[in-house]
């Protein structure tokens, strides 16, 4: 009997996320994106850092790498250079991506490796029980900020655009089919695809209702090849537009290195002779 597409990509692993966690929607969206693209399991590498989504790769029958805190991007770039034929997908949370791992984003953007980076932003450190993260808004009360958070949150999509990512999208864990479309487009994009996902944490920072009332899909008339249009869209304050915000075709890191598989094998052989 032929395995269903869901079991083709997914393991029997049961995630231990809290009920209602946005991560469930993202997990489903990634699975749907793989189905849509029909990629073979052995062509996919999923990587994660540390946090509530650290075990993400355990859910998939693909290659996986649970890396160190904040180090998804350097390892993803290494894999991409070693084998540009693979679909390399990094998963991180807001703490992992924008605090300890924040310094890697601009350098990844300027190298433009062909990788997809999905950041689940719940505006809190969930795994360590609810401390403010780089995206927590001013005034939000947590156990360690009883008078409210006093630090201004990073505007993540604006930062990514300023860093020069070649594909920028924002999605919402509550719009699973739409998010699956965004992720599939990100994987298809040749270059660094940065996908900022609004993913509520109902346990420590429940933003479900807020997002349900403010999130809107970007209309078909929007020109996602225009930097001006992207900057204008990201200035929107009332609503939170989701969709593909910006994309451009640019040479990738592997294009510039132009190292063929044969050359890599020869180099490996050469290095062996020096051992
Ligand atoms: Fe999800 Fe928050 Fe629970 Fe972590 S703490 S699993 S982010 S709901
Ligand atoms: Mg977080």
Image (cartoon, rainbow, N blue to C red):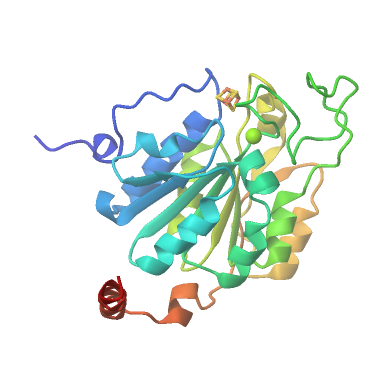
Q: Which quarter of the rendered picture does the C terminus lie within?
A: bottom left
State which image quarter holds ligand 1. Answer: top right
Q: Foreground residue, 161 or 53?
A: 53
Image position of 61 (left or right of 97): left
Whole-percent x and y of residue 64? 37, 45
Residue furthest left as drawn: 1
In the rendered image, the vertical position of residue 237 relative to residue 213, given as above or below: below
In the rendered image, the vertical position of residue 40 relative to residue 4, given as above or below: below
Image position of 260 (left or right of 128): left
In the rendered image, the vertical position of residue 158 relative to residue 138, given as above or below: below
Residue furthest front as drawn: 275
Q: Is residue 40 visible?
A: no
Q: Is residue 39 visible?
A: yes
Q: Foreground residue, 105 or 186?
A: 105
Residue appearing at x 69%, y 62% in the figure: 161
Whole-percent x and y of residue 177? 46, 41
Image position of 9 (left or right of 231): left
Q: Which quarter of the rendered picture does the N terminus lie within?
A: top left
Residue appearing at x 50%, y 23% in the figure: 17
Image position of 188 (left or right of 233): left
User: Number of marks in the image?
Assistant: 0
Q: Quadrant of residue 7?
A: top left
Residue appearing at x 49%, y 50% in the figure: 90
Whole-percent x and y of residue 24? 48, 29
């Amino acid at each position: 009997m032929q395995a269903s597409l869901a079991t083709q990509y997914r393991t029997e692993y049961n995630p231990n996320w809290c009920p209602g966690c946005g991560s469930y929607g993202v997990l489903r969206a990634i699975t749907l994106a793989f189905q849509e693209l029909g990629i073979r399991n052995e062509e996919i590498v999923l990587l994660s850092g540390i946090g509530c989504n650290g075990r993400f790769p355990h859910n998939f029958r693909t290659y996986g790498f649970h890396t160190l805190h904040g180090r998804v991007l350097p390892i993803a770039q290494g894999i991409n250079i070693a084998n540009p034929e693979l679909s390399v997908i990094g998963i991180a949370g807001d703490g992992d991506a924008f605090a300890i791992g924040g310094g890697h984003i601009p350098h990844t953007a300027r190298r433009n490796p062909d990788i997809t980076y999905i950041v689940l932003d719940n505006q809190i450190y969930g795994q360590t029980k609810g401390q403010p993260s780089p995206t927590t808004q001013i005034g939000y009360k947590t156990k360690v900020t009883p008078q409210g958070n006093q630090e201004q949150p990073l505007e993540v999509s604006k930062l990514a655009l300023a860093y020069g990512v070649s594909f920028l999208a924002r999605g919402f864990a509550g719009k699973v089919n739409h998010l699956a479309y965004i992720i599939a487009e990100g994987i298809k994009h040749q270059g660094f695809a940065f996908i900022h996902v609004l993913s509520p944490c109902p346990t420590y920072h429940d933003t479900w209702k807020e997002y349900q009332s403010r999130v809107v899909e970007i209309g078909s008339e929007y020109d996602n090849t225009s930097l001006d249009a992207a900057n204008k869209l990201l200035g929107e304050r009332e609503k939170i537009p989701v969709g593909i915000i910006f994309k451009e075709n640019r040479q990738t890191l592997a294009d510039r290195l132009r190292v063929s598989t044969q050359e890599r094998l020869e180099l490996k052989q050469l290095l062996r002779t020096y051992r």
